[in-house]
Amino acid sequence: MKRNPWRDIRLHGTVLVLVVIAELIGTIKIPITQDVAITIMPLIYTIILGLAFYLIKPIKWIHRKQARIAEGAMMLFIGVLIAKLAVSSGQSIGLIFEMGPALILQELGHLATILVLPIALLLGFKKEAIGMTNSIGREPNVAVVVDKYGFNSPESRGVFAIFIIGTVIGTIFISFLVTFSLSFLPLHPYAFAMASGVGSASMNAAAIGPTLAAFPGLETQIEAFAGFSNLLSFCVGIYIVIFVALPLTEKIYNWLEPKIGRESIMPKKEDEEDA
Amino acid sequence: MSEFIDGSENVSVHGIFNWIFLLAIFSIITVIGNYIGYKHPIQDSLVGMGILSLITLAGVWMERKLPLNISSIIYISVIGIALAFPTMPTSEFVSYYVSKVELLSIVTVFLAYVGIGMGKSWNEFKSLGGRAIIITILVIASTYLGSAIVAHIVLVMTGVPA
């Protein structure tokens, strides 16, 4: 019985302490210019402190075991987050139907990742670039790429790299990206809300935070659009990747690689045909 | 009971009792954070977290027990939307109590677990190198900005007031 994940006092106790510290510090606003300010929210403290507690050696009670439980528990807790967003969506269902065209078409905006392909080629990636730039590289996208190219293919190595780096820095990075975008891009509040549904629950969560803070009074609408758009990214986004993004990335790769491809930076393997 | 006892390497978070207790712990931590951060009454937000936990539990259970190959995320979304649907008798109750739990309170707790969990990927992360990090950052930025700009254009074209 000792091994039940909910009995791990070290893990849950640590999380409670992190949350209390984070909420007590509260949101900090750092003004840059007169009307531009960077907002740092409690959610950033807990994610960075959580990572630090795992990595810092003197802290002895957070180990691989705790990380594994945290990872598993997280899959369950995503449900609570999704449920909260779903309730907001249900309350605003009329508004969601009204905004249907924008919600559906913005899913195609995710194809913009392919614009990164030339940069990946210039940096010396070969077929890895196809795996790296066809999508945001979260779990469903990894599954699609591995399914299509095989586990040991360069394409899969590429998507794995994006997955791992995205896991570590994605959440923190997107929170700053959204903060800057809110300050510098004069877009519709709903557009920011819809864009935060990138197809990863934790990145979605981190992106909603600053958006909510920027538009007080629009909480329910923003939560509704953010939640619904993330849901669309899960259900529809995957088909966009399979039927549009991946074939398109391949086509552009085949056209562009002979023109701007560099010497491969990846270690050579004999089973690889050269591109 | 044997299904709850795992090998030392393999810590399982499955099994309905594990789910219930984990959700209870998560709810309590969230309610405390929600109280410190937003001063929402503890009783109301406990009811709110109870509702959200039940929806989650139902969704996770359906994913495992129903013979359809559908992710729990879809079940949870459908149940949540249905319960809060304006014409449903549950709508007022669910909307009131769930609104007492701030989304950001949930996110703050959730990301603490994410932070601890992602520590495991740290060594792999360090071995990947700067070029892959640049590409990841550009990919995330382009996916976000791409859909923000498309959404903005469609919203403006369909005449949605800001």
Image (cartoon, grey):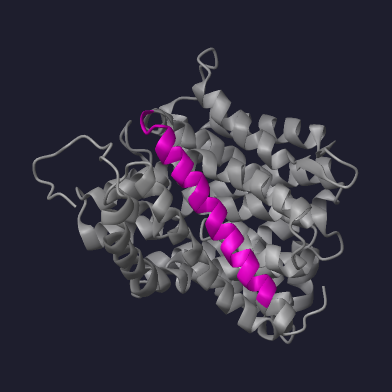
Magenta highlight on residue B144: yes
**Placement of A252 over or under B88, stated as above or below:** above
Q: Quadrant of residue A9?
A: top right
Q: How many marks?
A: 0
Q: Quadrant of residue A222?
A: bottom right
Q: Which residues are magenta?
A: B127-153
In the image, taking residue A215 as reference, residue A269 lies left or right, namely: left
Q: Nearer the viewer, residue A197 or A53?
A: A197
In the image, taking residue A216 as reference, residue B121 lies left or right, namely: left
Magenta highlight on residue B45: no
- Image point (64%, 49%), residue name: A206
Q: Nearer the viewer, residue B155 or B8?
A: B155
Place of residue B39 in the rendered image (x, y in percent of width and height, measured from the top left): 87, 46
- Image point (46%, 46%), residue name: B136
**Placement of A264 over or under A146, stated as above or below:** above
Camera sees residue A270: yes
Q: Tell which residue pokes out farthest to the top in this image.
A: A58
Q: Quadrant of residue B114?
A: top right
Q: Nearer the viewer, residue A85 or A105?
A: A105
- Image point (74%, 83%), residue name: B86
Query: Magenta part mainly helix, strand or loop?
Result: helix
- Image point (82%, 72%), residue name: B162
Place of residue B59 in the rendered image (x, y in percent of width and height, measured from the top left): 50, 66
Q: Tell which residue pokes out farthest to the right in this image.
A: A34
Q: Nearer the viewer, residue A192 or A75?
A: A192
| Image quarter (top left, top right, bottom left or bottom right) of the N terminus of chain A | top left
Place of residue A25 in the rendered image (x, y in percent of width and height, measured from the top left): 80, 32
Q: Tell which residue pokes out farthest to the front in this image.
A: A259
Camera sees residue A16: no
